Amino acid sequence: MKDPGNRDIAILSGVQILCFIALTQLEPHFLFIHLYELIPYVAILLFIAYGKDRWAYMLGPLVSVAWLGLAYMAGLLDSAVVHLWTPSGYTLGASLVSALTVVTGGIAVTITLRCRIHWKREFAGQGLAPRTFLLSLAAVASYYVVFLHWFWDMIPNA
């Protein structure tokens, strides 16, 4: 019987997907953005389901670190934390969005750490890292180039 050691990555990816789906309901004007954000986590689940763990373990940290970087540069994480620490005058919906933003950030950090641990335990020293890393990096870079281009086009010209 195969060791279900990747169950934690599958659960974290599933929870991340649920967070993005919840955000589609709380921020309907960003529906397509949030749906687009969950695509890599669906891919991680599919990789795990089809026994392609090395791709899931490489994709998870790359997608999560990129998401954290973009969220930090956009000020999403900072404003969410400030909003949660000073909740006066905010609506319940805004507070839920802030809480989900912090949760998705925490999940992204956890996925990054857990994937690295799994990679080191299962694939270190097998010579798979360079090829897997480069192909995963190309996929994640392409994904985020499309994401940023699409998001930039959504911003009205002033």
Image (cartoon, rainbow, N blue to C red):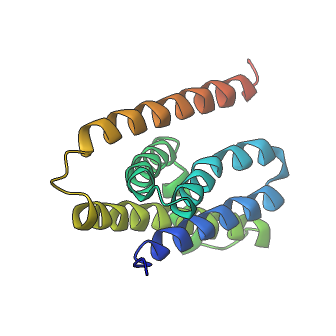
User: Residue at point 69% right, 67% down?
Assistant: 18
Picture quarter containing residue 32?
top right
Residue at far front of view: 1
Q: Residue 134 vs residue 92: left or right?
A: left
In the foreground, 20 or 51: 51
Given residues 76 and 31, the one toward you in this image is: 31
Horizontal and vertical percent position of residue 99: 61, 70
Q: In which quarter of the image is the N terminus?
A: bottom left
Residue located at (48% from left, 56% from top): 78
Image quarter in which the C terminus is found: top right
Q: In the displayed orientation, state which residue is furthest to the left.
A: 125
In this view, the residue in front, 112 or 27, is 112
Q: Position of residue 49 (x, y in %)?
A: 57, 63
| Residue 91, percent from left and from top | 78, 69
Taking the view exactly as shown, the residue that stands out farthest to the top is: 157
Looking at the picture, does residue 65 appear above or below residue 23?
Answer: above
Q: In which quarter of the image is residue 102?
A: bottom right
- How many marks the image carries: the answer is 0
User: Could you tell whether 33 is left or right of 137 in the image?
Assistant: right
- Residue 33: percent from the left, percent from the top? 71, 43
Is residue 49 left or right of 151 when viewed as pictured?
Answer: left
Q: Which residue is drawn at 40% across and 76% down?
A: 5
